[in-house]
Image (tube, helix red, strand yellow):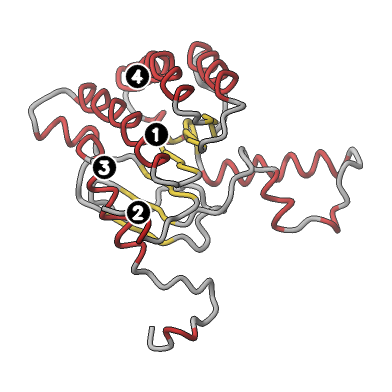
Amino acid sequence: MDYNDLKIPHHVGIIVDGNGRWAENRKLSRSMGHKAGADNLLKLSRYVISKGIKVLSLYVFSTENFKRSKEEVDFLMNLFTSKFKKDRKKYEKDNIKVVFSGRIEPLPQSVIDTMNEMMEMTKDNTGGIVNFCLNYGGHSEIIDACKKINNDVINQKLDINDLNEDIFNHYLYNDLPPIDLLIRTSGEYRISNFMLWQLSYAEFYFTPTYFPGFSSNDFDQAILDYTKRDRRFGGINYENKNH
C-alpha cells in the first residue's frame, strides 16, 4: 500500500489487548500470549514509525493491571525488563526516541532502571517517538498534572491565570501532541482509562484481531479507514457538507 496516497496521522495510540485470549485459543499459557505480544511490539513499532507516524503510544500495562494475580504481574515485570534490555539497541539503530508514561510506584527497581537506560540511550533520536504507557492511567495522569501545577503555583513558578490547555499539556507525563487515531485490538469497544486528555478528538478504530496477531497489514487497514474519515474538530467541513 502506497502511504503517499493516504492521510497520515501524526500521533497513533494503540490499546494493546488480547494477549491472554490469543494464547488460550491456542491452548497456551497466558504468559506465552504476553511474550508473543511483547515480540510484536518491537516489530509493529518499527513499522509504524517507518511509515511517517511521528508518535506511537502503546498501552502495555495499566494501573489497574496490578489487580491481576501475582504470578502474572511478576511475569510481566520480568518480561518488560528483558524485552527493553534486548530491544533498545534496535530502537537506537532506527533513530527512534523511547519515552515512558505512567507512575513509577510500585514498579520493581529492575523495570525502572531499564526504562531509564532506554530513555537515556535514545534521548537524542529524531526519527519518531515510541511512548510506552506502563503502570499508566488517564485519571492518574490528570491528577498528577494537577498536583504539579498546584506546586508550581504555590512556589510562584506559574500564575494560575496563565493556565491554558497548552500549558496544562506540559504537565502531563510527556508533552505529546493529541492522538489522531486510536486503535484497540481484541474486539473490545472501550478506551479503558487510556490518555483521556489526548483522546479528545481522536478517531477510533476497533479490530477483533488479538494483539499478537495484529500485523503490518492490519495496521495498513486502520490507516486506510482513517484516510476516509472526515475530521471536523467540532466545526464543519464545507467541502463535505453532507457528512
Circles 1 and 3, Cβ within 8 Å, touching? The answer is no
Residue behind mark 4: 70
- Secondary structure under tag 1 reads strand
Residue behind mark 2: 3
> x, y percentage for residue 189?
30, 56
Q: Is residue 23 left or right of residue 220?
A: left
Circle 2: residue type: Tyr
Circles 1 and 2, Cβ within 8 Å, touching? The answer is no
Residue behind mark 1: 60
The vertical placement of 224 against 99, above or below, is below
Q: In terms of image quadrants, where is residue 50? A: top left
Q: Nearer the viewer, mark 1 or mark 2?
A: 2
Crowdedness near tag 4: few (<14), some (14–19) or many (≥20) residues, C-alpha within 10 Å: few
Circle 4: residue type: Lys
Q: Nearer the viewer, mark 2 or mark 3?
A: 2
Q: Residue at x 52, y 45 (%)?
A: 138
Q: Is residue 158 left or right of residue 229?
A: right
Circle 1: residue type: Val
